[in-house]
Amino acid sequence: MPDLLKRPFGTHGKVHAITPESAGWRYVGFDLWHLREGDTVSDSAGRNELMLVMVEGKARISGAGQDWGELGDRMNVFEKTPPHCLYLPDGSDWEATATTDCVIAVGKAPGKGGHEARRIGPDGITLTQRGDGSNTRHINNIAMENEDYCDSLLVTEVFTPAGNWSSYPSHRHDEDDFPRVTYLEETYYHRVNPADGFGIQRVYTDDLQLNETMAVHDGDVVCVPRGHHPCGAPHGFEMYYLNVMAGPLRKWRFVLAPPVEHLT
């Protein structure tokens, strides 16, 4: 069985540390920090560009030689308000001091020195609906293709109401054949409300050589190296996930699974 489901390895400090080497791919890295008020942490980007996302809480952050002040005002991710984010190019150092208990996500991908450090959001990020009926979900686009903020990274937040499906109709982006489809590795950082609930994510290929269905709990990360990857939120539990994608081309093009093509 592929090791696609990553559970947090603690409740304080760095609780996820996904690298291309640990995931068995080439582009995407993902860290998650749980900090208590007063904690200070620091790290270096190296050859990667970074997207820091204040999932919850507040922190004073410096990076790329600048003091960015206090970032964050969403104290619970399910408030659904736009996040405060910080883009840092490759070669940057950064430091964060928590001014409240906070959760900071760090998406990583190869940098090319093509973009300057910048704050992203909350201004300019608008919660928008995608889909309808039981396929309704709500999106906070942080740095998707239309936002020319990054060299490699594509980053977005998705809120799925209880009883609904998301990342659906099932689709894949696992071939480097632009403009038909692009190769993008992807991580899903999941949150569930209430936190003692669960959601479902399936990762599968058309030929079912990869065919995994996982119960995801609050704080889990699912790695999607290839194949389709729909999510379901059971009745009574709403789901959030933060997507980080990257590949050889910063374009999001996908192919639908044949059985669900008629649903679009």
Image (cartoon, helix red, strand yellow):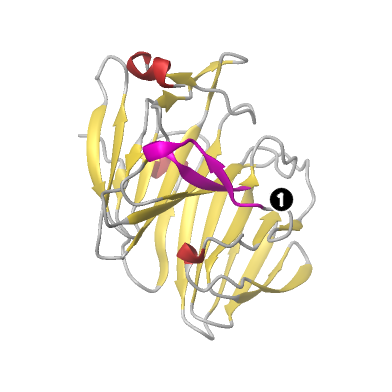
Q: Amino acid at mark 1?
A: Pro
Q: Position of residue 161 (x, y in %)?
A: 39, 51
Residue denoted by label 1: 89
Q: Is residue 175 above or below residue 94?
A: above
Q: Is residue 255 left or right of residue 48?
A: left
Q: Which residue is rendered at x = 44% and y = 43% of the image?
A: 187
Quadrant hosting residue 52: bottom right
Q: Which residue is rendered at x = 76% and y = 57% of the image?
A: 118
Q: Position of residue 40 (x, y in %)?
A: 56, 79
Q: Which residue is rendered at x = 36% and y = 55% of the image?
A: 238
Q: How many marks?
A: 1
In magenta segment, residue 133: yes
User: Tag 1: Cα neighbours inside 10 Å, few (<14), some, or many (≥20)?
Assistant: many
Q: Which residues are magenta?
A: 126-141
- Which of 148 and 193 lies nearest the eye of the viewer? 193
- Which of 231 and 112 lies nearest the eye of the viewer? 231
Is residue 90 visible in the rendered image? The answer is: yes
Q: Is residue 118 above or below residue 24?
A: below
In magenta segment, residue 262: no
Q: Is residue 53 above or below residue 140?
A: below
Q: Is residue 151 left or right of residue 223?
A: right
Q: Is residue 106 left or right of residue 147?
A: left
